[in-house]
Image (spheres, grey):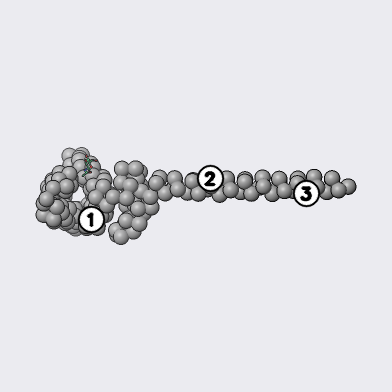
Amino acid sequence: MASSAVSKQSYCHSLAILSTTLAFFCVAKTCLAENFKPQVESGDDFIKTSCGVTRYPDLCYEKLSAYADTIQDNPTQLANVSLSETLKNAESTLIMVQKLLKKRKLRPREADAIKECVETMKDSVDELQKSMLAMSDLEGPDFDMEMSNIQTWVSAALTDEDTCMDDSEENSIDGKVKDTIRSYIVTVAQLTSIALALINSIH
Ligand SMILES: *[C@@H]1O[C@H](CO)[C@@H](O)[C@H](O)[C@H]1NC(C)=O
């Protein structure tokens, strides 16, 4: 009787030790897992938070979250990636607007408006290219000057895109052509606005 009580007690005792040990490992494992996770997730969280200051947080996050590994939690990298995505988009938008000029049977005033749009989009691409180049030079002593140049160029690019959109709003332009141009320009203008906001958050 006594011996069985003792063995029952020691059985319970080992069970207690076992579950304590298990609990410890579980906690330790969770802690470790949580220590590792933020390194993977910090880029993502940082991008989400930073995109929150832009006018188009969803588009911002959608475009940039794929680059979380490159961006990590570095505002300059974030702005650089955003700028580079904007430039890519501006280049392909320019090509699409140029194609529009060739493919469609246009009335002279429509052709003129689209030509204007092509010219302003070329300027926009130019300004974004200059900005990208200046971005790689931020390490030097001229940080403030380079930053202010980049801000000037990117806001000029945005103005050009808005101008292109306005050109296409003219009454002389066919509704379908109008909608097509607008659909091209809307995205690049939003991406440019995002890039500008992220550039302005670099200190
Ligand atoms: C910015 O991005 C471009 C293209 O992805 C890259 O070549 C360049 O090194 C980056 N610049 C900086 C300052 O990280």
87 to 164, vertically: above or below: above
Q: Dot 2 lies on which element?
A: helix
| Residue that numbered label 3 is attached to | 9
Q: Quadrant of the C terminus?
A: bottom left
Between disc 1 and disc 2, the foreground one is: 2
Q: Is disc 2's CB within 8 Å of ligand 1?
A: no
Q: Closer to the camera, 21 or 105?
A: 21
Disc 2 target residue: 29
Local crowd size for mark 2, using a 10 Å CA cut-off: few (<14), some (14–19), many (≥20): few
Which dot, 3 or 1, sits closer to the camera? 3
Identify the amino acid type marked 3.
Gln
Q: Nearer the viewer, residue 177 or 21?
A: 21
Badge 2 or badge 3: first in the primary sequence: 3
The amino acid on which the numbered mark 1 sits, given as a three-letter code, is Ile
Q: Residues within 10 Å of mark 3 (few under 14, many from 20)?
A: few
Residue neighbourhood size for the residue with mark 1, other residues' Cα within 10 Å, grouped as few (<14), some (14–19), many (≥20): few
At which x and y percent is residue 45?
38, 52
Q: Which mark is residue 202?
A: 1
